[in-house]
Amino acid sequence: MNPIEGAVPGTATPPPDPRLHNADLAPATTGQRKWKVFDLFAMWMSDVHNLGNYTFAAGLLVLGMSAWQIFSSLLVGFVIIYIGMNLMGRVGQRTGVPFPVVARIGFGVWGANIPALIRAVIAIMWYGIQTYLASVAVNVLLLTADPSLKSLTTRSFLGLNELGWISFLALWVLQALIISRGMEAVRKFQDFCGPAIWLVMIVLAVWIMMKAHWHISLTSSLKHISTGEQVRMWFGGVGLILSTYGTLMLNFCDFARFAPDERTVRRGNFWGLPINSSAFALVSVIVTAGSVQVFGTAITDPAELIAKVGNPVILIIGAVTFAIATMGVNIVANFVSPAYDLANVYPKRISFKVGGMISTVAALLVLPWNLFSNPVVINYFLGGLGAFLGPLYGVMMVDYYLIKRGRVDVDRLFAADASSPYFYRKGFNPKALIAFIPTAVLSAVIALVPVFSPIAAYSWFIGAASAALLYRLVADRQPATVPLVPAVESEHA
């Protein structure tokens, strides 16, 4: 059974509409709420400890920022993300429902498919791309460990050589096996893979510091830039963190719904975001700075750095660990969301597992290595869709906290008739769309048009703020007709 908010004890609860309901979209039951502080902490470790975030932090060092500047910039960014995650996490924990059902509160029972499908398309494409990037890192390490494998790189099929296909499909199958077992398997996997990459990073940091004779400067930069440019880059780092984690901030309720209470969500987020994420960024910068002292050049790819160790055992461990790390971030950021989002489109036939398998197959069929090599797809299509996420977040947060004032009748989220306060106009909330569409266009223009490049890093924040303001102006404040009462047991659990 499931604690819900906004239900009135003693009143009849309408049966859920099968077009809007299945067991995976229903509120999480008490027995399903097994995600404790460590599980959420490990989830963030899985999401943060990946090649992309390492390269991002290391790249700022190459551009001219010092280690302490990078650390402080990313710390501020992660504190903002921490606050945003708590806001969405509170919604998920209280209602017990996943993102596409939460989206029904503001966008309507049918209108929720708009944000859900936008999030799903982005996630599916990045799921494939992240799997491909992990396979590339594994290939580098495998070729270093066994040069004879080079014979598998001479022939290609659909744009990928034989070794590339082997590595990609191996990772693809492993991820499919994990996610086919549902969210409980995801939780257990995160508990393992998050700490695993930390162990490798610590070993790598100790090794590079020994090579550098334990002297790595945290205040010097690799090239001289003006104070004004340093300030611009500092704020740019904050903005890019918001853009990077804005995707998961939108659907964090997918995970928070399984927490037993709000305190668990806040504590897990605290240790996982401002503490752990900033520490990982600092270690990434220290390792990169050490590579300059030891090798004379900044090595921003940890797989390339591990290859320089020259020990076959270390190479194999590194290959396995980076594969695990990428699977971790892929499952957190790019699998769970489309699995729920696709289930929301056709709940009668698509469960969480079926939606996940559809996402996995789609991520393979799009041939992600070709997507990644196409700047039009990455910058304009995925970049444009990504810019829409800020306005979606802004509308949903204002609707829940300022318009609905935290009062939600969870049972009515599964009703597809005019008696539901979330039916609006034929299942769509026109005012949410009025706020979303123009601000999504604004956010995409800022992110993609070259003339706005100085503020492109802030496109997510600008989109979220402008959508929140516009929605607050056009939406009517809902009367307190839905009472907030102590938690009761849901009849639909």
Image (cartoon, rainbow, N blue to C red):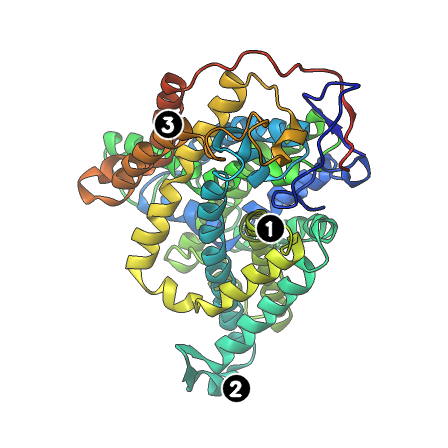
Callout 1 secondary element: helix
The numbered dot on residue 24 is none
Query: Which dot, 1 or 3, sits closer to the camera?
Result: 1
Tally of numbered tags? 3
- From this view, report whether residue 301 is shown above or below residue 100: below
Residue that label 3 marks = 467
Which quadrant is home to the N terminus?
top right
Question: Looking at the image, which is closer to me, 86 or 440?
Answer: 440
Question: Looking at the image, which is closer to me, 491 or 258?
Answer: 491
Q: Is residue 131 left or right of residue 187?
A: left
Q: CA distance from mark 3 to mark 2?
A: 56 Å
* Percent position of residue 430, x then y: 40, 30
Would you say residue 267 is visible in this rendering? no
Residue at 62%, 27% in the rendered image: 90
* Percent position of residue 147, x then y: 51, 82
Residue at 35%, 29% in the rendered image: 434
Residue that label 1 marks = 343
Give the residue at the far front of this rendering: 418
Residue at 41%, 60% in the rendered image: 295
The amino acid on which the numbered mark 2 sits, given as a three-letter code, is Ser
Residue that label 2 marks = 148
Q: Are marks 2 and 1 in contact (CB under 8 Å)?
A: no
